[in-house]
Amino acid sequence: MDHLRYSGLPFEEQRAAFLAIVSADPLIRDALARARSLDLPDWLVVSGALYNSVWNHLTGKPSGYGIRDVDLFYFDDSDLSYEAEDVVIRRAAAHFEGLPLPVEVRNQARVHLWYPQKFGQPCPRYTSSSESVSHFASKTHAVGVRYEDGQLGLVAPFGLDDVFSFRIVPNRVMDNQRTHEVKGARARENWPEITVVAW
């Protein structure tokens, strides 16, 4: 099986392949359908569940292999309280019940409020879910998918070639070296085909 068959192709071909792979994956298809009906503002299914599903497809592994959870972002700056986000998290928990993996729901309008305490450094105040994706520790992880006018839309600020090249590349926009290295090492355990580019 040629796991690198989409590496180096033009972006539009990679985009079509990426969306075809994730929409055919039963776990992702179900998560996206449920996220769509939850109807949160500016929602995005992001990161690991997506690129891990692509790697599983390209290496012949089963759906869900190596995936810890599904990350669902939304953006709502009308109420930045923890309580408002918690209401959404609890509503989502009931909505996603029965999905084989937990769904982590986070309001990206609030990240700047808790990030410094958790990670010891400031975080910009994001203006959208897509903007927060561009601040992930690795460029490879910066992918998001959602329904737009009935079609699957893709957010990929750094393109898709790193995903299809099985290459985890640092994103130095913030000091996320530790996250990049920890996630890279864990990914290599599941997909030994991966190369982790040093910070």
Image: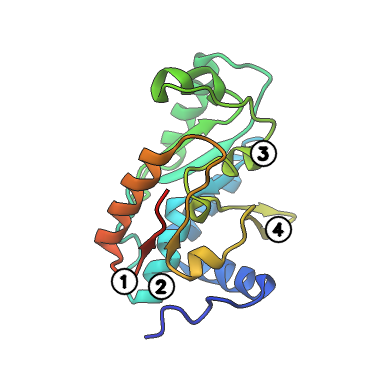
Residue 175 visible in image: yes
Q: Nearer the viewer, mark 1 or mark 4?
A: 1
CA separation, marks 1 and 4? 29 Å
Q: Amino acid at mark 3?
A: Asp
Q: Amino acid at mark 4?
A: Gly
Element carrying mark 4: loop
Q: Which residue has dot 3 on it?
A: 42
Q: Which mark is residue 57?
A: 2
- Residue 177 lies left or right of residue 42; in this view the side is left
Q: Which mark is residue 140?
A: none
Q: Residue drawn at (62%, 36%), measured in percent from left and top?
A: 40
CA separation, marks 2 and 4? 24 Å
Q: Which mark is residue 61?
A: 1
The x, y position of residue 163, in whole percent, is: 49, 64
- Residue 51 lies left or right of residue 195; in this view the side is right
Q: Amino acid at mark 2?
A: His
Q: Which mark is residue 150?
A: 4
Q: Is residue 9 above or below residue 166?
A: below
CA separation, marks 3 and 4? 15 Å
Q: Nearer the viewer, mark 2 or mark 4?
A: 2
Element carrying mark 2: helix
Q: Is residue 109 above or below residue 146?
A: above
Q: CB atoms at circles 1 and 2 under 8 Å apart?
A: yes
Give whichever of discs 1 and 3 has the lower sequence position.
Answer: 3
